Amino acid sequence: MLPNVIVLIAALVSAAVQADETIRLEEMVVHAEEALPLYGSGANLGTALEGTPGIANQSFGPNVGRPVIRGQGGNRVRLLQDGLGAGDLSALSPDHAVAIDPLLAGRVGLLRGPAALAYGSGLLGGAVNVDDGRIPQTLPEKPLSGGARYGYTSPDDAHGGAVRLDAGAGSLGVHLDGSRRHSGDLRTGRGVLDHTGSDRRSGGAGLSWIGESGFLGGSVSRLENHYGVPSFEAVPLDIDLTRTRHQLRAAWYGPAAGVEALDLAFAHNDYRHVEIESGQRGSRWTRRSYEGRVVLRHLPVAGMAGQVGFHSRHGKVAAIGEEAIVPRTKTAS
């Protein structure tokens, strides 16, 4: 008798060197900006993406959620904002929220396999890149344009809304955005889950000079998030989180023969949160990080296009208080 034969479907995973990576899986071709639609009411990034095939949500109550890709989470999945690290501490502890507001996300891309190698060698799950569009790269078609969104969910009586504006004059492009979300305690089939309310607000502004040969721009943004953490203990816990981010981006198109473009990006994040127990301020966590990338993309040579670049990250993490579980840490790579 012949043994059972199992035929496995071949899967080919490839990635383009361009900014909009293409993911090829079996016979399906999906562009990054279409691969990750946002779901839910914008409570957190994990909830917004958990409806996507292959992505789960590592949640710690309704206010904290981090994407899990192919069963990998934590430091094996990097969260990027406009191509550079978000600069938070969400990978360190499950009750630390992601410092990205999904209500202001313009496009969300998934980087896996070869495409993720450009952002770190240990990203077994991949990376999620949230493009907020705060640094204009092209002049808008209209002198002034914008959009708004609003959502409501009844289980936690949550109200959330966001507004964004884009304007252009001459060679200058301007972007403004802001959002606010407030929720109460979550109501479940067994009653109210105490201490699950939240109050989050964020906003940013960006300015760019845009020409035929490239662009140069910068942005500043701030996120404030005060949320409750559910616990079986009698002592209620709140976390008061803030993050201020400064970012610069530039591109020079065709700077030399055989070169398609030279891209530069830099970001500085000042993150901190305080854990509040029974109304008393307790442990304090801080992270200050700097990150920069320089990438040169060359035109096809012998039918092959590629890129050469330099990527550097520096950061300091400190935790002060009785529940400080990590020592002061300084990293550079």
Image (tube, rainbow, N blue to C red):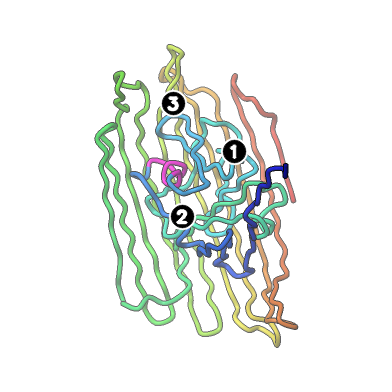
- Which residue type does callout 2 highlight? Leu
Q: Can residue 46 be found in the magenta stretch?
A: yes
Quarter holding residue 154: top left
Q: Residue 38 carries which label?
A: none
Marks 2 and 3, the one that precedes in the sequence = 2
Secondary structure at numbered mark 1: loop
Location of mark 3 (residue): 229
Comparing 211 with 36, the one in front is: 36
Tell us which disc is closer to us: 2 or 3. 2
Q: What stretch is highlighted in magenta?
A: 43-50
Residue 199 higher or lower than 51, as above or below: above
> In this image, 240 relative to 246: left or right?
left
Quadrant in which the N terminus is drawn: top right
State the predominant SS element of the stretch in magenta. Answer: helix
**Residue bearing mark 2:** 36
Secondary-structure class at tag 2: loop
On the rendered structure, is 185 left or right of 61?
Answer: left
Q: Which amino acid does label 3 sit on?
A: Val
- In three-dimensional space, the C-alpha distance between marks 2 and 1, rounded to whole angstroms, equals 21 Å
- Magenta span contains residue 80: no
**Residue on which disc 1 sits:** 91
